[in-house]
């Protein structure tokens, strides 16, 4: 039987340092999502899942996605309150409803906000480990969802169909507020091999300080209009417009991020915020691309999947990461992106209902 429009089930949360990601399930096919905030990642239709894949028996319907700023957790509470949550978070024909008022939650906020959810909604947050969830979400997307993974180079997006038997091992790089790098060897088989504190939170925080932007989207938009060559010191700036060809460094290679913002003839106001935003995005994406490559090299991994809300399907970000991986690996390793990039943890928590 189809659920009524406000009836949802299997609600799962990933409460991160910056954003709360929410995933839930509905069976009503005629339901179009128009609630504020209740959008799939790119604002297109919800993920329709009807695969009879035995690994994922709960999936016959639609998975919906929503996100909220963690600092505005009340908006998330309000959103959940407006929905009719069947059997707490869980909807299943046969399953006994023992943990009636529990919903799966991951991320640090599952601990930090546990009391808030209990007091406001009477919901227990059933905590799942965030790395387990990241990997669970990524494996689910890579195995069960068509047209999920893609490469992005020189403005060209190309979907890659992954052979299930040839998925592992791979490096998963999740770029959230901070960055985690995981070597994934199978379902539930992984190791956190590295990470970096220079991540999405750094881009947004530093970007805000430098440009006075009011929102992340504004900063991203600004970076789109900028030119980093005004701010970054290029090899050509040092070599009089020439390449440093002995070591394969083109004149356009960045020698020093922000290295040109030191001119004594320029006032600080002469540096345009759009150029600053672009340099910053380039610096952070490049750095993450390089560290990812080094970790892929450590373990002989050829494929690197990038997730996390930092990416936002932004062309320049993906291009920079891809070029960094390509450049450092001399074409040996490939950067790949995921359509549901920001929802890996939330999807992993969602999938854990079936455990
Ligand atoms: P976390 O779990 O740490 O919150 P996410 O995967 O949600 O990590 O990514 C958070 C990062 O995503 C931010 O640091 C920022 O770079 C980027 N981001 C994308 N969209 C937004 C947004 N609307 N508001 C704030 N940050 C955003």
Image: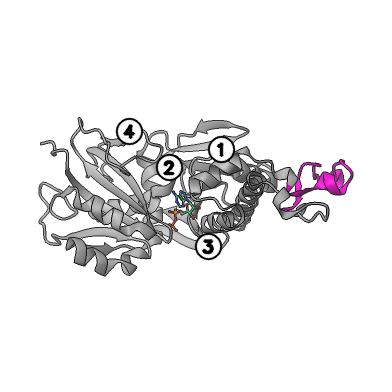
Q: Are marks 1 and 2 in contact (CB under 8 Å)?
A: no
Assign the N terminus to one quadrant of the image: top left
Residue placed most toward the observer, 227 or 27:
227
Check contact, mark 3 vs mark 1: CB within 8 A: no
- How far apart, in angstroms, are the residues tagged by discs 2 and 3? 23 Å
Lower sequence index among marks 4 and 2: 4
Disc 3 is placed on an element classified as: strand
Q: Which of marks 2 and 3 is nearer the N terminus?
A: 2
Left or right of 75? Residue 335 is right
Determine the residue positioned at 46% across, 54% down: 184
Residue 292 coordinates in the image, percent (x, y): 59, 54
Give the residue pinned by disc 2. Answer: 165
The part of the image, by quadrant, that contains residue 275 is top right
Q: How far apart are marks 3 and 4 (CA)?
A: 35 Å
Which numbered mark, 3 or 1, is in the foreground of this view?
1
Q: Is mark 3 within 8 Å of ligand 1?
A: no
Query: Callout 3: few (<14), some (14-19), or many (20+) C-alpha neighbours within 10 Å?
Result: some
N-terminal-most mark, 3 or 1: 3
At mark 4, the secondary structure is loop
Circles 4, 1 touching at the beta carbon (< 8 Å): no
Return the mark for residue 315: 1
Give the distance between the C-alpha atoms of the residues marked 4 and 1, in whole angstroms: 21 Å
> In x, y percent, where is residue 24?
26, 47
Q: Give the range drawn in magenta.
A: 231-258
Q: Label 3 belongs to which residue? A: 193
Query: Mark 1 and mark 2: span between their CA atoms?
Result: 30 Å
Front label number (4 vs 2) = 4
Q: Label 2 near label 4: C-beta < 8 Å?
A: no
> Which label's residue is closer to the chain start, 4 or 1?
4
């Amino acid at each position: 039987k189809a659920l009524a429009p406000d009836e949802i089930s299997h609600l799962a949360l990933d409460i991160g340092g910056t954003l709360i990601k929410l995933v839930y399930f509905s069976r009503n096919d005629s339901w179009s999502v128009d609630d504020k905030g209740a959008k799939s990642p790119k604002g297109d239709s919800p993920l329709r899942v009807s695969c009879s894949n035995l690994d994922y028996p709960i999936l016959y319907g639609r998975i919906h996605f929503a996100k909220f700023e963690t600092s505005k957790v009340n908006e998330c509470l309000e959103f959940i309150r407006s929905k009719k949550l069947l059997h707490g978070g869980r909807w299943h024909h046969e399953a006994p409803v023992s943990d009636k008022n529990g919903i799966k939650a991951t991320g640090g906020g599952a601990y930090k906000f546990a009391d808030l959810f209990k007091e406001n909604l009477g919901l227990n947050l059933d905590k799942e480990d965030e790395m387990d969830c990241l990997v669970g979400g990524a494996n689910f997307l890579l195995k069960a969802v068509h047209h999920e993974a893609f490469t992005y180079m020189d403005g060209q997006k190309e979907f890659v169909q992954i052979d299930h038997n040839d998925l592992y091992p791979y490096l998963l790089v999740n770029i959230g507020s901070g960055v985690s790098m995981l070597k994934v060897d199978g379902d539930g088989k992984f190791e956190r091999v590295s990470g970096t504190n220079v991540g999405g939170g750094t881009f947004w925080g530093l970007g805000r300080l430098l440009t006075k932007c009011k929102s992340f989207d504004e900063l991203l938009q600004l970076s789109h209009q900028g030119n980093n060559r005004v701010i970054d010191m290029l090899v050509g700036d040092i070599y009089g417009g020439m390449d440093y060809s002995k070591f394969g460094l083109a004149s356009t290679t960045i020698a020093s991020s922000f290295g040109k913002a030191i001119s004594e003839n320029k006032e600080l106001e002469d540096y345009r915020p759009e150029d600053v935003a672009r340099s910053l995005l380039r610096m952070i994406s490049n750095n993450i691309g390089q560290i990812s490559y080094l970790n892929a090299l450590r373990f002989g991994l050829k494929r690197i999947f990038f997730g996390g809300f930092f990416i936002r399907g932004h062309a320049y970000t993906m291009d920079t990461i891809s070029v960094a991986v390509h450049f450092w690996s001399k074409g040996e390793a490939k950067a790949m992106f995921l359509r549901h990039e920001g929802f890996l943890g939330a999807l992993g928590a969602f999938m854990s209902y079936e455990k």
